[in-house]
Structures are given as C-alpha cells and as structure tokens.
Image: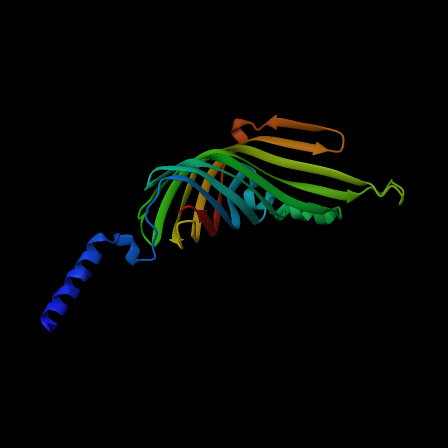
Amino acid sequence: MKCTTTRLASVVVVVVVVVTPSHAFADTPPAKRGFQLALRTGASVPFGKAMNDLDSSEFSGVQVPFLVDIGGKPLPELFLGGYVGFALGSPAGTTADFCEAVDAGCAGFGWRVGAEVQYQFIPDGKVNPWVGYGIGYEAVGFGIAQDDEDASDEDDEEAVFAAALAGYEFAHLMGGADFRLNKVVGLGPFVDVSFGRYTKVGFANDDTARSDDIDDSDEATHGWVTFGIRVVFFP
C-alpha cells in the first residue's frame, strides 16, 4: 500500500510539472511584443564644441533631461519607435559670466526628437540588457530675464532675451539594463552618448525673433553624455 501511494504521488508530481507553463515557476514575466513606453531622466553633460570658436561647456551647463521612448516591438528582441524630450539646466562658462555681469536671472533649456531602434538581448529574462541607436534633431539655449530699470515700480516690467542653437543628431548611442519587475513595469540604469552639429542660431526678445544659418566653416561636432534611470512599461 505504501509503495502504491508513493508511486501515485510521483505520477501526480510528473503530471503537474508537464502541464504547468515554465514561467509559472519563476517571477519573470514572458517576453512580449506590441506597444512599449519608457521614461528616462538623470543628468546630461555637454562635451565638444558648439561652434568652432565656442566650447559646448561655455554655452550650456549640466542639464536634467526628461525623455520619452515610445513605439512597439514587432519581435520580442526588437523595439522600433521614437524619442522626444526636454531638459532644464543652467548656463555655464562665459554665458554664466555674462548673466552675472548684467545681474540677470538665467535658465538653460533643451529639447530633442528623433527615431530609434533598440535590440534587447534577453527579452524573457529577469534582467534584460539592451542597446540602441537613434538619429534626430535637437536644440539647446538659455533665457535671460532682467528688471527694466527704465520702468516704474508699478509696471514691474522685465526685459526678456533668449538665444538657442539647433541642429541634427547624427548618432545617438544608448544602452542599459531593464529589471523586469512584472509584465507591466520594469526599471534600470541607462547611459547614452549623442553626437551632432548645430546648423542654426536663433535670438529672441520681447519684440522680435530671428534665426540664421551657421556658416559651414563655423560648424563643429558636439555631444552629450546622459546617464540615469529608465522606467519601462510593458517590458
């Protein structure tokens, strides 16, 4: 009787193992296809030259980016989509010196938009490393607000001025690792390095705005190193 019971228990265990999906024994959700969205933030540090006679670090300081990756996965390993984002920061170098000299409040800003592709190495794993490449368009600038000394206290007017550089990102290299917490959300570190060339310069104040092309001889290659945390939905 004891032998029969033992054999019966063994058969039940085998049947359970056979009919139970393999992912039920682990916390890791299965690989998926379809819509995917990710939010990224951290710190962006400029390098290279904004123009031939202007280092990027003399025009813009470290910025805090807010980026969105949105698209879909036709295959579990492949993500196709786009990115859009903006960043806030402060001027640096000679730009910051100018703001201090005229006793003005200054703030830095930036935005970018583009297309990207990502390859995800272990889409059904608990930890999913990935790499990506993108191209797009970006702008960086700063704004100045200064009290108008000619205005009365009642008017409390400010003189506002902004300057910006814009151009193409020809290489946006990125990578990271997603810790897939469940089938809805994952998070992990990321780093990306972008390279581009500014081709336009713009100025604006209270009354006018204008944009000019940068001469080919003045164009130079600049870049950004960005690192931080990525939260991904439907990993």
Residue drawn at 47 percent across, 50 percent down:
231
Of residues 75 and 80, the one nearer the viewer is: 75
Number of marks: 0
Q: Locate residue 200 relative to residue 207 in the image: left or right.
A: left
Query: Which quarter of the figure has residue 95?
Result: top right
Q: Is residue 111 above or below residue 27?
A: above
Q: Residue furthest front?
A: 1
Residue drawn at 67 percent across, 27 percent down:
210
Visible in this render: residue 111?
Answer: yes
Instruction: Tell me where residue 47 appears, x and y as whole percent.
Output: 50, 45
Residue drawn at 71 percent across, 42 percent down:
144
Of residues 40 and 133, the one nearer the viewer is: 40
Visible in this render: residue 169?
Answer: no
Of residues 218 and 19, the one nearer the viewer is: 19
Instruction: Tell me where residue 78 appears, x and y as whole percent.
Output: 34, 39
Residue drawn at 61 percent across, 42 percent down:
109
Quarter the N terminus occupies: bottom left
Instruction: Tell me where residue 157 appears, x and y as whole percent.
Output: 82, 41
Q: Residue furthest bottom?
A: 2
Instruction: Tell me where residue 75 appears, x and y as whole percent.
Output: 32, 38
Q: Is residue 162 above or below residue 208?
A: below
